[in-house]
């Protein structure tokens, strides 16, 4: 805790108040005497966690992060409320995971449980996108769009609203409990919990009709699993966004470890340009900037860091590349009239080139990125083709194996098949099943209602129905214990829409002779 | 050594110690995380409440019941009641409707056949086999040969009252023991068995067949019919087809004629409720392809 003791003390002679000794506001730089909580020297295995109090940053990257935060949160909270007309036989929610009925609706796409491989494809694409993004520009996912980052940002906004910015919060932490401190804390935690409940609340809307569920939730008529889900997610959000924060990224998330394999010397990463910055020294108004490093050791990059690190220590496991230190440093550089970009997106290769006096060059197109991109395109193309060519009907044939075959009184052999017919059309359809590869075979339906026959197997809209179908053939027509046959599913026009290969079992020829 | 000392002092400097020191060795004060500790305390408080409310402690001949009166057995019973209530939409219909009417409703049929299948798995597979394909002396229910009739009503009656069972409405037929009761001699039985082989198109000794034919007409045709086609009223099997309950070989036929046969099937109406019996009948009917 010793690092925090002299926080916020302005060093004399360096950051006078505006107007004093003729200085303008532009040249005033607030220097914070602070050591990064997770700085390289401070990192000890035996130390308990110190709370990080990030200061509000402002600048281009912060603005970009606000926009991304707005878009992602708006999508998360808003998406279940989008409507999409699918006719009377299906729900009209644009994005819906209907677990009881086993359907996933995504705008014009409807996924059945057996098509869950689309999810695999999506996950592969997502993973590859992550790899590609990381090899191009480091941990952009972590820094801008990871839910942990977005919600932590949201929780920080609330914390700032309730307790003020960094300095005020540190003062408040140290202050003894009082009415005003209690009030601030109460406001903060209440708002955090409300945010958590809203977060969990939005999640359940993806699994049921949102307007109906909202009414049920409010009137306490929703299923208990909805309340349990909300409670679990609300407490997880409250814990991760309000309390655990950077520890989730550093200790719980495997991605920081994996991403080391994705970056190389050509990946853009938030970098402190040490060659320009060092040797660092305190700000002096009349300094000769060619003789010294440009870093004035004002520690503004340290105080804005949500991970509590010092970017000037170089690449670190903790760094999520959120670029807030770039904003903080650029702001300072503008004030002291130096070019911005002492901290900026750069590649290790470029740093090395500059050291040798060469012109740095950005290499975005590399074998690694090409392979990732090609893989994404390939998987996306495969998914698109299968999605566009997938059939609206399906047939699944299961040969009944107990008994393998039945000998009838006239000596003919009968096999039974369970045939499942899938109708994804929006209306009732009739099908028939025929057999190919056994001309003597006669097909019949058993177990249907009176009046139903093999000629007209009726399947309702958006349903799967299974039929027991008997295939009978004279013993004389069989040679061998197993005959390969093909069952064909025909639509009401008699066209074959699906085929399924199966076998017809009979007693071995020896036994037939007997 | 100097760096070790430095490191040590650095750590000691920044981490609290318990203040204990033995031979220069100090102990760091790193207690359990507080959230862990508090969770632990909450669990202890929780357990006290649990002891009071739920059945917890075993006693010598009983256990503490708990104030909520919870019991897993009662909970299962309640679940079964609920499931029964949920199924009553179908079971009520099955109880009320005739078998023919049930067969008009494809949804009801699906439920009945599924229920029949599970009842079959509990009550019938011991003799008829899990695939209902039977065995020696136990009929295969998948084929189209029915001793007592294969239409839905006949199957229903067989299941309800059984065959040679102790029910007063039981189906009954008697295959006499021709040798044991000294109706026929061994050589006459051999001849009639040879003749029986020819009924289903099997090879047989021509001289014996000629001797056996009049014996069959005299002794067997009353139940099995003059052409050996069988008679369902008595459960007399069709001797002209490919399906043999005990076996198609001469030796088996000789044994059957000599000693008679009297297989038994229990009456299920006294053991199962009417809905289950109906479901079983529908399931068996579907298995056989539906006569």
Image (cartoon, rainbow, N blue to C red):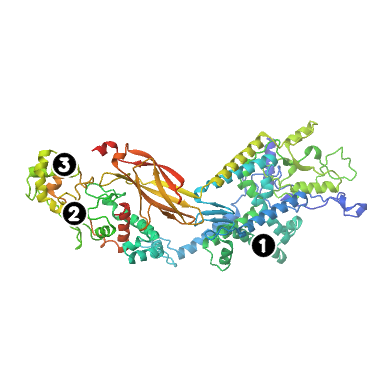
The x, y position of residue A478, in whole percent, is: 32, 39
The x, y position of residue A204, in whole percent, is: 57, 59
Q: Which residue is mark 2?
A: B231
Residue depicted at x 79% and y 53% = A8
Residue A257 in view of the camera:
no
Crowd tier of the residue under label 1, counting other residues whose Cα lies within 10 Å: few below 14, some 14–19, many 20 or above:
some
Chain for disc number 2: B
Look at discs 1 and 2 and give the one toward the viewer: 2
Q: CA distance from mark 1 to mark 2?
A: 85 Å
Give A1 or B77, whichever is nearer the viewer: B77
Instruction: Decide which of tag 2 and tag 3 comes sooner along the chain.
Output: 2
Crowd tier of the residue under label 3, counting other residues whose Cα lies within 10 Å: few below 14, some 14–19, many 20 or above:
some
Say which quarter of the image contains residue A18. bottom right
Crowd tier of the residue under label 2, counting other residues whose Cα lies within 10 Å: few below 14, some 14–19, many 20 or above:
some
Pointer 2 and pointer 3 on the same chain: yes
Q: CA distance from mark 2 to mark 3?
A: 22 Å
Please tell me the numbered disc located at residue A191.
1
- Marks 2 and 3 close (CB-CB < 8 Å): no
Q: Which residue is mark 3?
A: B250
Look at discs 2 and 3 and give the one toward the viewer: 2
Secondary structure at numbered mark 1? helix
Say which quarter of the image contains residue B197. top left
Give B257 or A499, whichever is nearer the viewer: A499
Horizontal side of residue B285 vs A77, given as left or right: left
Q: CA distance from mark 3 to mark 1?
A: 91 Å
The x, y position of residue B244, in whole percent, is: 21, 46
């Amino acid at each position: 805790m010793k690092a925090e003791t002299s926080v916020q003390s302005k060093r004399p002679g360096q950051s006078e108040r505006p107007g004093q000794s003729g200085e303008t506001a532009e040249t005033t730089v607030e220097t914070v005497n602070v050591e990064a909580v997770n700085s390289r020297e401070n990192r000890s295995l035996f130390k308990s966690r110190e709370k990080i109090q990030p200061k509000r940053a402002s600048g281009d990257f912060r603005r970009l992060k606000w926009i991304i935060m707005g878009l992602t949160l708006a999508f998360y909270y808003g998406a279940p409320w989008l409507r999409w007309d699918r006719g009377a036989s299906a729900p009209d929610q644009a994005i819906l995971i209907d677990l009881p009925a086993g359907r996933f609706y995504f705008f014009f796409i409807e996924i059945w449980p057996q098509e869950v491989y689309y999810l695999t494809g999506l996950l592969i694409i997502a993973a590859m996108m992550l790899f590609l993004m990381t090899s191009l520009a480091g941990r952009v996912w972590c820094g801008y769009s990871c839910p942990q980052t977005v919600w932590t940002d949201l929780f920080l906004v609330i914390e700032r609203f309730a307790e003020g910015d960094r300095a005020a919060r540190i003062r408040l932490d140290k202050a003894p409990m009082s009415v005003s401190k209690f009030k601030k804390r109460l406001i903060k935690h209440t708002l955090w919990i409300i945010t958590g409940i809203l977060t969990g609340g939005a999640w359940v809307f993806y699994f049921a009709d949102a307007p109906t569920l909202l009414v049920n939730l409010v009137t306490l008529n929703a299923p208990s699993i909805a309340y349990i889900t909300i409670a679990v997610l609300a407490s997880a959000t409250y814990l991760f966004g309000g309390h655990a924060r950077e520890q989730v990224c550093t200790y719980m998330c495997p991605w920081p470890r994996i991403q080391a394999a994705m970056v190389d010397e050509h990946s853009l990463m938030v970098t402190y340009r040490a060659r320009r910055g060092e040797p660092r020294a305190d700000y002096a108004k009349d300094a000769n900037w060619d003789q010294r490093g440009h870093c004035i050791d004002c520690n503004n990059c340290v105080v804005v860091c949500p991970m509590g690190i010092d970017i000037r220590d170089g690449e670190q496991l903790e760094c999520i590349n959120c670029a807030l230190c770039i904003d903080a440093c650029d702001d300072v550089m503008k004030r002291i009239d130096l070019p911005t970009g002492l901290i900026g997106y750069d590649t290790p290769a470029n740093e090395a080139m500059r050291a040798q006096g060469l012109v740095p060059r950005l290499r975005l197109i590399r074998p690694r990125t090409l392979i990732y991109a090609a893989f994404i395109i390939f998987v996306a193309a495969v998914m698109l083709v299968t999605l566009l060519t997938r059939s609206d009907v399906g047939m699944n044939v299961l040969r009944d194996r107990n008994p393998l075959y039945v000998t009838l009184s006239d000596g003919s052999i009968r096999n039974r098949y369970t045939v499942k017919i899938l109708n994804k059309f929006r209306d009732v359809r009739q099908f028939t099943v025929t057999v190919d590869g056994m001309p003597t075979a006669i097909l019949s339906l058993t177990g249907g209602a009176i009046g139903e026959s093999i000629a007209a197997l009726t399947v309702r809209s958006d349903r799967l129905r299974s039929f027991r179908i008997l295939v009978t053939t004279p013993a004389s027509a069989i040679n061998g214990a197993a005959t390969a046959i093909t069952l064909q599913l025909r639509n009401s026009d008699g066209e074959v829409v699906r085929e399924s290969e199966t076998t017809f079992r009979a007693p071995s020829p020896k036994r037939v002779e007997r | 050594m100097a760096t070790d000392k430095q490191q040590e002092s650095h750590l000691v400097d920044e981490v609290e110690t318990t203040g204990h020191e033995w031979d220069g060795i100090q102990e760091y004060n790193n207690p359990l995380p507080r959230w862990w500790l508090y969770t632990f305390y909450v669990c202890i408080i929780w357990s006290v409440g649990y002891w009071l409310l739920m059945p917890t402690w075993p006693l010598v001949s009983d256990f503490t019941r708990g104030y909520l009166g919870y019991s897993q057995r009662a909970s299962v019973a309640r679940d079964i009641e609920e499931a029964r209530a949920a199924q009553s939409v179908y079971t009520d219909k099955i109880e009320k409707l005739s078998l023919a009417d049930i067969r008009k409703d494809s949804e009801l049929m699906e439920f009945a056949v599924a229920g029949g299948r599970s009842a079959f798995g509990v009550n019938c597979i011991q003799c008829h086999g899990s695939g209902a394909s039977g065995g020696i002396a136990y009929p295969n229910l998948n084929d189209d040969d029915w001793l007592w009739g294969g239409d839905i009503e006949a199957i229903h009656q067989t299941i309800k009252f059984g065959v040679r069972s102790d029910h007063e409405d039981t189906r009954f037929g008697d295959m006499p023991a021709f040798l044991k009761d000294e109706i026929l001699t061994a050589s006459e039985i051999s001849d009639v068995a040879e003749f029986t082989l020819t009924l289903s198109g099997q090879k047989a000794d021509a001289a014996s067949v000629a001797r056996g034919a009049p014996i069959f007409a005299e002794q067997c045709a009353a139940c099995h019919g003059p052409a050996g086609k069988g008679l369902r009223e008595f459960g007399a099997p069709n001797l002209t087809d490919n399906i043999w309950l005990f076996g198609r070989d001469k030796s088996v036929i000789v044994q059957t004629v000599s000693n008679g046969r009297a297989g038994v099937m229990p009456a299920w109406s006294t053991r199962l409720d009417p809905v289950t019996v109906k479901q079983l009948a529908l399931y068996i009917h579907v298995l056989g392809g539906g006569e």
